Image (cartoon, helix red, strand yellow):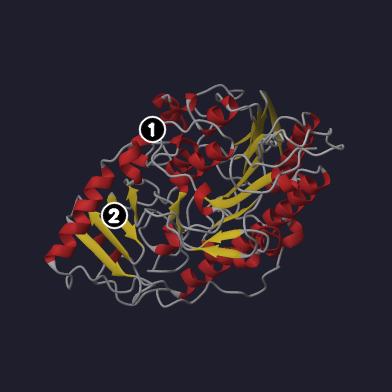
């Protein structure tokens, strides 16, 4: 069983042990100790679906295994708050304007567009495989998989493949199919067919297979579809949250939207029935997360039993956040508001400080280069993100970013228009090209984005922010990291 050595660096200088040293003449120099290379770490990524950062408060195993034992990034964001583009970003390390997946459906997005771009031949899976890793995906892949391909299709770079595709929609909890390494298996409506539990089973199966090849490190991407709608709760968790209601934050069912662009300002006030449905969805979403939380507990215990926990990095995050009543959104994402763009990011692993919080500005573009650097692979020049490895010890290196691009293209499901903006440490600035409207929020004084300051801001500030959006919206590779 591989064990981690001390130190977060890629190699550490540790004297070789074992046995007494041979006598050395007193007038001759002693040989220097030989540096022992640190074993390549395992990497586990758990990606929830539509999980807002606040909901993690209801996941006790997540807190015990990951938060208490690792680092929580408090300023973590998705660059496009929509499943398909975000998942493509995670795989490629690129902003949406570079990987080309604009939404969830063809022709602008979805699995068919992802295949057509040719980017499947160069992803975090292929990069880690080239570095010597055994790779696996368990759960949800790019939206609409495997539409347009054979049901048995397995993308390049994946040694083990347990990808979900649904017989009734892309996010079913029952009545779905899995491509299991080229064999399609169907699942029905029995309690044992609950998708999160099946994903948990397949993930543990992979861990045990990987342990049989103990000298080879592994990367496994585990992607349950909870708490995405329809948010069907496992029978054992029904009623777990009683009459709990969605948080009544100041922006819940916001009374005055006159400061918002015309698309948002036309949102009707939520009536009692809509508020009740929102509260019910909130409880159901939390209910589905209990199975994810149990999966985390099971995975961590399995890694411990296999002797791999000390040499494994575990990352927990989501593809995007979720609005539940804020700014009159009964439910959804796509919007440039904090609940939509902010995502959890929690990491534990060798030498990551325990129970620590880090406030560096990070995003989903950073995960692929992080994994590749941990695996001592080569990060391609096409990657827009920055490796988080320098942050995992707790410090923030000089020159770390002070802003991020956020971008969105018209989504036929939500109807939200194109928008492009920048999220700094203290502000959110957004432009809507079609209507030439803008939003500007001072998050220090208005964390719930209740009052846009675009009319009060001076021209120089607006020009500076607009120029930064333009620069980032056209950036590629290294230019995106500046």
Q: Position of residue 217 (x, y in %)?
A: 68, 34
The residues tagged by marks 1 and 2 sit, at their Cα atoms, a distance apart of 22 Å
Q: Inspect this view and state whether residue 100 appears.
A: no
266 left or right, relative to 145: left
Q: Residues within 10 Å of mark 1 (few under 14, many from 20)?
A: some
User: Quick one: SS at disc 1?
Assistant: loop
Q: Residue furthest front?
A: 27
Q: Which residue is mark 1?
A: 382
Q: Inspect this view and state whether residue 252 appears.
A: yes
Q: Quadrant of the N terminus?
A: top right
Q: Which residue is mark 2?
A: 421
- Answer with mark 1 or mark 2, whichever residue precedes in sequence: 1
Residue 165: image quadrant is: top right
Residue 409 vs residue 284, the one in the foreground: 409
User: Quick one: SS at disc 2?
Assistant: strand
Q: Position of residue 202 (x, y in %)?
A: 73, 38
Numbered disc in front, either 1 or 2: 1
Residue at screen point 64% across, 38% down: 220
Residue at screen point 18% across, 54% down: 435
Residue 477 vs residue 263, the one in the foreground: 477
Does 107 sit above or below residue 297? above
Residue 13: image quadrant is: top right
Q: Position of residue 286 (x, y in %)?
A: 62, 63
Residue at screen point 19% across, 52% down: 467
Q: Residues within 10 Å of mark 2 (few under 14, many from 20)?
A: many
Residue 264 vs residue 420, the one in the foreground: 420
């Amino acid at each position: 069983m591989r064990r981690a050595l001390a130190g977060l660096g890629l190699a550490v200088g540790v004297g070789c042990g074992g046995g007494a040293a041979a006598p050395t003449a007193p007038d001759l120099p002693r040989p220097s100790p030989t540096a022992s290379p640190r074993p390549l770490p395992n990497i586990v990524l758990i990606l929830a679906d539509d999980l807002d950062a606040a909901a993690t408060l209801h996941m006790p195993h997540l807190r015990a295994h990951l938060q208490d034992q690792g680092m929580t990034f408090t300023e973590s964001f998705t660059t496009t708050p929509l499943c398909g583009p975000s998942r493509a970003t995670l795989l490629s390390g690129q902003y949406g304007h570079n990987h080309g997946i604009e939404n969830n459906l063809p022709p602008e997005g979805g699995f068919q567009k992802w295949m057509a771009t040719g980017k499947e031949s160069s992803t975090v899976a292929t990069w880690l495989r080239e570095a010597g890793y055994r790779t696996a995906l368990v759960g949800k892949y790019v939206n609409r998989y495997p539409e347009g391909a054979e049901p048995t299709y397995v993308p390049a770079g994946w040694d083990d493949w347990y990808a979900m595709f649904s017989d009734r929609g892309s996010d079913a909890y029952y009545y779905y199919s899995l491509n299991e390494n080229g064999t399609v298996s169907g699942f029905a409506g029995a309690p044992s067919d609950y998708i999160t539990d099946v994903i948990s089973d397949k993930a543990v199966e992979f861990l045990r297979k990987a342990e049989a090849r103990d000298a080879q490190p592994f990367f496994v991407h585990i992607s349950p579809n909870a708490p995405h709608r329809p948010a069907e709760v496992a029978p054992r968790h029904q009623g777990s949250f009683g009459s709990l209601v969605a948080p009544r934050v100041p922006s819940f069912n916001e009374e005055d939207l006159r400061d918002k662009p015309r698309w948002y300002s036309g949102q009707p006030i939520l009536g009692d029935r809509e508020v009740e449905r929102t509260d019910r969805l909130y409880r159901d979403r939390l209910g589905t997360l209990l199975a994810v939380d149990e999966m985390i507990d099971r995975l961590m215990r399995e890694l411990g039993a296999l002797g791999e926990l000390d040499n494994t990095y575990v990352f927990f995050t989501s593809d995007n956040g979720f609005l539940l009543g804020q700014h009159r959104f009964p439910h959804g994402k796509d919007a440039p508001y904090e609940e939509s763009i902010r995502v959890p990011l929690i990491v534990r692993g060798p030498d990551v400080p325990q129970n620590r919080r880090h406030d560096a500005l990070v995003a989903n573009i950073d995960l692929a280069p992080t994994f590749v650097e941990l695996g001592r692979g080569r990060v391609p020049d096409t990657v827009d993100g920055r490796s988080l490895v320098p942050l995992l010890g707790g410090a923030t290196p000089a020159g770390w970013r002070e802003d991020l691009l956020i971008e969105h293209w018209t989504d036929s499901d939500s109807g939200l228009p194109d928008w492009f903006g920048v999220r700094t440490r203290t502000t959110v600035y957004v432009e809507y090209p079609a209507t030439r409207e803008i939003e500007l929020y001072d998050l220090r004084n208005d964390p719930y984005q209740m009052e846009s300051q675009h009319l009060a801001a001076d021209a120089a500030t607006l020009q500076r922010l607009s120029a930064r959006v333009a620069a980032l919206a056209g950036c590629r590779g290294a230019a995106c990291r500046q």
